[in-house]
Amino acid sequence: MKWHTSHQFPALRLIVRSGEKCRVVKTVWDAAVTLISDWPTDDGEEYVVAIRACLDALHDVIPPEAVREALIRAAAEERILYISVIE
């Protein structure tokens, strides 16, 4: 496990909790923290897949881009708005 690396992917801006909180997610770690701390529910199928994807990416089983895709599907499941951030 490489905790010291960022596992970056193209950034996403998520509007969670009915628009009251905006998160910019740039890394696998950011995705994991957002899912655990800011997600409105923890019982969606895509949510569970996204959590698992974070763990797998942190263990170098899957690429960071797979986490981004899983996070987008989890956001769609919860009707969370997201946009790609161009830096």
Image (tube, rainbow, N blue to C red):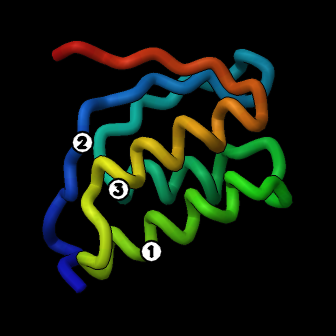
Name which of mark 3 and mark 2 comes first in the sequence.
2
Gap in Å between the C-alphas at discs 3 and 2? 8 Å
Query: Which residue corresponds to mark 1?
Result: 55
Tell me the SS state at disc 3. Answer: helix
Examine the rendered structure and indicate whether residue 74 appears above or below residue 42.
above
How many marks do you count on the picture? 3
Gap in Å between the C-alphas at discs 2 and 1? 15 Å
Percent across and percent down for residue 77 are 75, 37
Query: Which residue corresponds to mark 3?
Result: 28
Tell me the SS state at disc 2. Answer: strand
Query: Which residue corresponds to mark 2?
Result: 9
Name which of mark 2 and mark 1 comes first in the sequence.
2
Is there CB contact under 8 Å for labels 3 and 1? no
Would residue 8 be found to the left or right of residue 80 on screen? left
Name which of mark 3 and mark 1 comes first in the sequence.
3
Percent across and percent down for residue 52 are 54, 71
Tell me the SS state at disc 1. Answer: helix
Residue at 39% in and 37% down: 25
Residue at 57% in and 64% down: 51
**Tag 1: amino acid:** Leu
Percent across and percent down for residue 14 are 54, 26
Would residue 76 be found to the left or right of residue 82 on screen? right
Would residue 81 be found to the left or right of residue 25 on screen? right
Residue at 33% in and 69% down: 57
- Mark 1, other Cα within 10 Å: few <14 / some 14–19 / many ≥20: some
Is there CB contact under 8 Å for labels 3 and 2? yes
**Tag 3: amino acid:** Val
Percent across and percent down for residue 68 are 40, 44
**Residue 29 picture quarter:** bottom left
Q: Nearer the viewer, residue 1 or 22?
A: 1
Gap in Å between the C-alphas at discs 3 and 1? 9 Å
